[in-house]
Amino acid sequence: MAKSNTILIKLESTADTGFFYVIKKNPRKITHKLEFNKYDPRVRKHVLFKETKLK
């Protein structure tokens, strides 16, 4: 069987709430660190989420 191209990464909130999303990323196609504006339910607004390592 072939090895999967995708890895799991954590998108952590920059609002320092500790909230995060776990998503898949193909590191061969996307080489830069991801940043998204997503909803943080702890502050009830859209904030910037940055890519960190999933432990």
Image (spheres, helix red, strand yellow):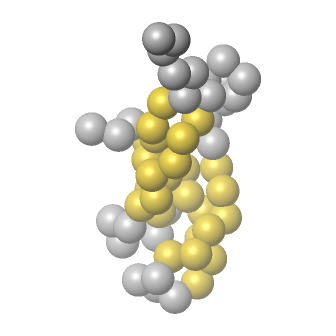
Q: How many numbered circles are shown?
A: 0
- Farthest bottom residue in view: 44
Query: What residue is at 46 percent from the left and 58 percent from the top?
Result: 21
17 sits left or right of 38 in the view: left
Query: What residue is at 60 percent from the left and 62 percent from the top?
Result: 48
51 sits left or right of 54 in the view: right
- Farthest right residue in view: 29
- 39 to 23, vertically: above or below: below
Place of residue 7 in the rendered image (x, y in percent of width and height, measured from the top left) = 48, 30
48 sits left or right of 41 in the view: right
Place of residue 13 in the rendered image (x, y in percent of width and height, measured from the top left) = 47, 62
Judge by depth and name the residue closer to the eye, 11 or 23. 23
Place of residue 44 in the rendered image (x, y in percent of width and height, measured from the top left) = 52, 88
Query: What residue is at 46 percent from the left and 70 percent from the top?
Result: 15
Q: Quadrant of the C terminus?
A: top left
- 51 to 21, vertically: above or below: above
42 sits left or right of 24 in the view: left
Query: What residue is at 55 percent from the left and 58 percent from the top?
Result: 49
Place of residue 35 in the rendered image (x, y in percent of width and height, measured from the top left) = 64, 49
